[in-house]
Every structure is written in structure tokens, then in C-alpha cells.
Amino acid sequence: MNTYDLRETIHYYYTKIRETNHPYYWYCLADTQARAGLTNEARQTINNALSFPNPYPSRQELLQMHERIQPFPSREMSQNRPSIVAAKRGDIDGDGKMDNVLLTANKTPDSPLWQNITLVVQNQRIPLKNNLGYNPTLFLGDFTGNKVDDILVVIDTGGSGGMIYAYVFSYINGQMREIFNSDAFNEHYKYDVNFENQYKATVVSHKLKEEYILDLTYKGKEYLSEIYNQDGILKAPIKGWVNPLSGLYPVDFNRDGTYELEAYQRIAGRYNADSLGYAETVLKWNGQAFVPDRQNVAIFGGEI
């Protein structure tokens, strides 16, 4: 398969991922990227595939594939120079002068996908662990309470699950430090989701040691009849899951000039498109890390 065919195939799998977010297409994308020589991108795609509760073809095979693909400096199909995809100005280091903050990236031909997304503060280039995605954005604001602008970077992964990559950087003790990343958040905020008798589902947050009970009657009679018998008893056990981070928003809840982070994770039922609601976590900086201030679960409304 020539370079043009590989590029077209990669674009096809990106389209299917955006439409269905099925684990099969994440695997196919990783395989095609590896054959195209995009080894770093292939390893990152495998990491995305491993985030599914039931990855394709299996977790073990994906891990073996990840080991076989050795990381090399990224070899782009296109030799285009990086473009500026987002730009802001703010006082990042507290010296009272405005600094230029940029996101640069390489455009994938015939696709809205950006590769090699890099944060640039003045002349300092800061690589991102997950540097491949859609619609990269910047926000500047004070998250740490020191009256100096910090940097929030959010990138869409492109899957129908709406997952994102997110980072917060802050100038601390004379150097730029990463103080939040979505991978670490996803690792720490784990849940159990179980369907229960009488049209309910429970969501257990291990991090906060809290349980939430969802009323599923809003899903409608047709939906409920597929999984419950007439007296509200489950026909078979069903387990759902909570997706990785799908939204991260700066909100100044106290109106004191310091922003909190409001994190959203979508709750899935029988399959990824079976949305049950969202876990919403408000994170505050405690001087060393972002810690949970409170957490809620929100469900969708039903027709009256």
C-alpha cells in the first residue's frame, strides 16, 4: 500500500472512530499508523484503545502490539511546518509583562486532525504526552491563587465518547510545571456501575467513597422492557462503566479570581452510546495538587 493509500485509510478510520468510537476501529487505526511508520501515533492510539473496558482484539494483544512498535521520532506523511493553532497573551511568570502562549501543530492532509501539538511559552517549547487530536484550545487564568496566569490546554480525541486530553501548566519556583493531566485524573477516578432491580443503577465512586443512585425510568418503557421483566426485576446482570474525562472547564465558583476545574465523565450503560448521565467533579488547588472539592452525578431529563 503506497503513502497515499495509507493516508486515505488512516482518514477513513478516524472518520469511523468519530462516528462509532468502536474499539475495533481504534485497533485498525493503530495497525495502519504502524505500517505507515507513524510509530509514536500508533502507540498513542493503542493507549486510547486500552481505555475501553473490553478493548479489541484483547488487552493482552494490544499490549504486545504496543511493545512491538518501537518509538521513533515522528515521521509525518506531510513535511509541512508547524502551524499556530491557538494563541493567547498573559502574565505567566508574574513579572508584570505579557507573555505569548501558543499551541503549534502539524495539520494532517485532508483531515481536521492535528499532530505534534506543542505548547510554546515565549521561546520555550513544552511537549505534550498526548499530542494528537482535534480542536486544540488554550485558556489562561489563575488556578493556583497566586494572581498569575496558568495555562489550560484541552484537545478532543475525536471519538464519539467525547473523550479529551487536558493539561494545566503553572510557573512555580522559576520553572514551568505540569500540575494536571487527564491521564493521571483517569487513573485515580475509578467507578463501578451496576444496574439494579426496580429500574435503578448505582454508581460507586472509589476516589470519594460515595454511592449515587440513578432513576432509569426516564429512559422509557421500550428501553426498560429490554432489560427488566414486568415486575421490575433484571433479566440478567448488567454492568456499565464511567468513561475517561470528557470535559474540563474553568469556573470561578467563589468569584474570587481563582478558577476551579469542573470535570465531566460520561456514565455508560450497556454500551458506549447508552448514556446514563455524567459524573461531575469540582477540583480545587490545595497548594500541591488539584483535589476534589465535591462531586455530583447528573442524569438526563425525560419527556413529560
Image (tube, grey):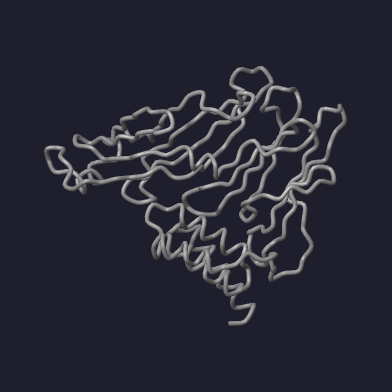
> In the drawing, does residue 19 fall left or right of residue 42?
left
Q: What's the residue at 75%, 38% (across, down)?
A: 176
Q: Residue at x 49, y 30 (%)?
A: 281
The image quadrant of residue 143 is top right
Where residue 53 sits in the image (x, y, percent)?
A: 38, 52
Q: Where, by quadrant of the figure, is residue 1 drawn?
A: bottom right
Nearer to us in this view, 178 or 64: 64
Q: How many marks?
A: 0
Quarter that holds the C terminus? top left
Q: Is residue 212 above or below residue 53?
A: above
Residue 270 lies left or right of residue 34; in this view the side is left
Q: Is residue 159 above or below residue 124?
A: below
Residue toward you, 34 or 3 = 34
5 to 48, vertically: above or below: below
- Please, which residue is most extreme toward the bottom here? 1
x then y, percent, for residue 249:
59, 34
In the image, 91 versus 215, the foreground residue is 91
Q: Residue at x 60, y 30 (%)?
A: 289
Q: Is residue 5 above or below residue 279?
A: below
Q: Is residue 98 left or right of residue 24?
A: right
Q: Position of residue 32 (x, y in %)?
A: 54, 71
Q: Nearer the viewer, residue 142 or 251?
A: 142
Q: Position of residue 41 (x, y in %)?
A: 60, 62
